Image (cartoon, helix red, strand yellow):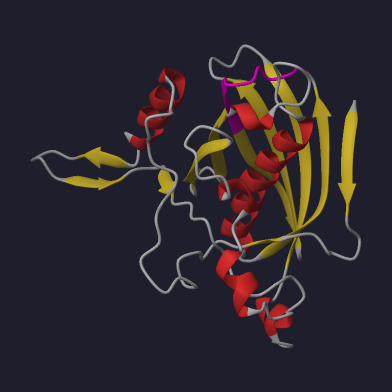
Amino acid sequence: FTHSRSSPSCSSSVQLWTLPLPFLSKPRDFSVPNSSWGPEMMRLYEHYNSQCEVEMEGGGKREGLWRKLPSYNRILKYATGGVYLSKIIQSKARLFTRNIREPGAAFEYVLFANSEEQKCVGIFQAGHLLEGPPGHVHGGAIATMIDTVTGTHASMLSGPVMTANLNINYRSPIPLGSTVLLESCLDKKEGRKIIITCKVMSTDGSKVHTETTALFLSINVCHLLERA
């Protein structure tokens, strides 16, 4: 079936690319291997990570086509719409996909970007707290990861963006605890609009779990903060 989430007033959550600035101390990157990562998660991580640097003749190295994107558990101290969060709320606020401390219990993921090919990939291992249908990942958790990967991709292409629409076709359920690959590709840019396609696939590419078309709108962050 098809799941759509429309937001003509652009009231959905903000996707931002510049993440480390709001932190008072050095942030922790959560998109690095930990003891919960399975063999497929590690294999794909090492595959893309090995392409972030290329060895040159003479032993030197240069940047490769791919770049690993860090992931933190905080974004901004401002709520959507520019409303300033109280100190109490601000101190407790956490990025939704990083709000569970137990490694492997929920969203384990890492993103890599290829600016030359205008692609972004996400490696996602679904933990036991993401169960929907018995033994399988909840559709909302899948949509969250699609929004995370495509939103990050769109913000890399056009600066800060907001999700306007996600149209997700669920093709095949994802077994709980398994690892999948999300591939995000730019389809079109028209003014403020960025249209991106995304597939969620098994790690060997033999099965497509979902197909998505996502629409994002570029925004001016100052408009969100002007009432702070």
Taking the spot 41% from the left edge, 46% from the top edge, the residue there is 67
Residue 221, above or below 6: below
Nearer to the camera, 58 or 174: 174
User: Would residue 180 be counted in the magenta stretch?
Assistant: yes
Measured from the top left, where is residue 81 in percent x and y? 77, 75
Q: Main secondary structure of the magenta part?
A: loop
Nearer to the camera, 179 or 116: 179
Q: Quadrant of residue 86?
A: bottom right
Q: Quadrant of residue 15?
A: bottom right
From which residue to which does the magenta span run? 172-182
Question: How many numbered tags mark residues here?
Answer: 0
Taking the spot 64% from the left edge, 47% from the top edge, the residue there is 148
User: Would residue 88 be counted in the magenta stretch?
Assistant: no
**Quadrant position of the N terminus in the picture:** top right
**Quadrant position of the C terminus in the picture:** bottom right
Taking the spot 49% from the left edge, 45% from the top edge, the residue there is 113
Measured from the top left, where is residue 142 in percent x and y? 71, 34
Measured from the top left, where is residue 109 in percent x and y? 52, 38
> Which residue is farthest left?
58
Taking the spot 50% from the left edge, 45% from the top edge, the residue there is 101
Measured from the top left, where is residue 196 in percent x and y? 71, 45
Nearer to the camera, 139 or 70: 139
Residue 132, above or below 222: above
Q: Is residue 133 left or right of residue 89?
A: right
